[in-house]
Image (cartoon, grey):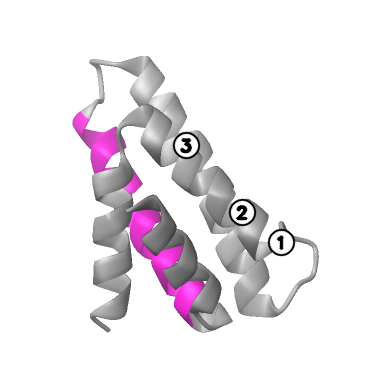
Amino acid sequence: MKLELNQQFLRASDKEKAAILLAYAVRMTIMARESYGQIDELSRNCNETIHKIASQALALTIGSTKRYPDDVFIEMIIAGAEQKGWIVELARAFKEANAT
């Protein structure tokens, strides 16, 4: 799944990449919301992930070169998702973004 997500992201247009990242951000807010008052670590991890992906999505949307290279960024996001057990959520974000 990791390689498939990586390749799909790298083949996407900037608009499609932004859509994937924003769909993942939405999934992260849902996960964080479910943890309110229970697991501060989960809320913090979700918030940090949302910050990274929103910043990258903004840079893609406005055409800024002040961002991570796509291959470095998606590897970082996939590694974080695998480490935190969120890879299924990331895969869902890819599907949701491609549904539009």
Local crowd size for mark 3, using a 10 Å CA cut-off: few (<14), some (14–19), many (≥20): some
Upstream in sequence: badge 3 or badge 2: 2
Extreme residue toward the front, this view? 3
- Reading the image, the residue beneath label 3 is 80
- Tell me the amino acid under the disc marked 3: Gly
Upstream in sequence: badge 1 or badge 3: 1
Considering depth in this image, is 67 or 76 the residue closer to the camera? Answer: 76
Disc 1/disc 2 C-alpha distance (Å): 6 Å
Q: Quadrant of residue 29?
A: top left
**Vertical side of 44 occupied by 5: above or below:** below
Q: Position of residue 53 (x, y in %)?
A: 53, 53
Residue drawn at point x = 63 percent, y = 60 percent: 71
Disc 1/disc 3 C-alpha distance (Å): 17 Å
Question: Is residue 10 shown in magenta?
Answer: no
Residue drawn at point x = 60 percent, y = 77 percent: 61
Q: Circle 3 — which element?
A: helix
Residue drawn at point x = 24 percent, y = 58 percent: 92
- Reading the image, the residue beneath label 1 is 69
Local crowd size for mark 2, using a 10 Å CA cut-off: few (<14), some (14–19), many (≥20): some
Q: Circle 1 — which element?
A: loop
- Reading the image, the residue beneath label 2 is 73
- Tell me the amino acid under the disc marked 2: Phe
Please report contact status of discs 3 and 2: CB closer than 8 Å, yes or no: no
Indicate the quadrant containing the C terminus: top left, top right, bottom left or bottom right: bottom left
Magenta-tinted stretch: 16-34
Q: Position of residue 93 (x, y in %)?
A: 30, 61
Residue drawn at point x = 63 percent, y = 73 percent: 60
Q: Circle 2 — which element?
A: helix
**Vertical side of 13 occupied by 67: above or below:** above
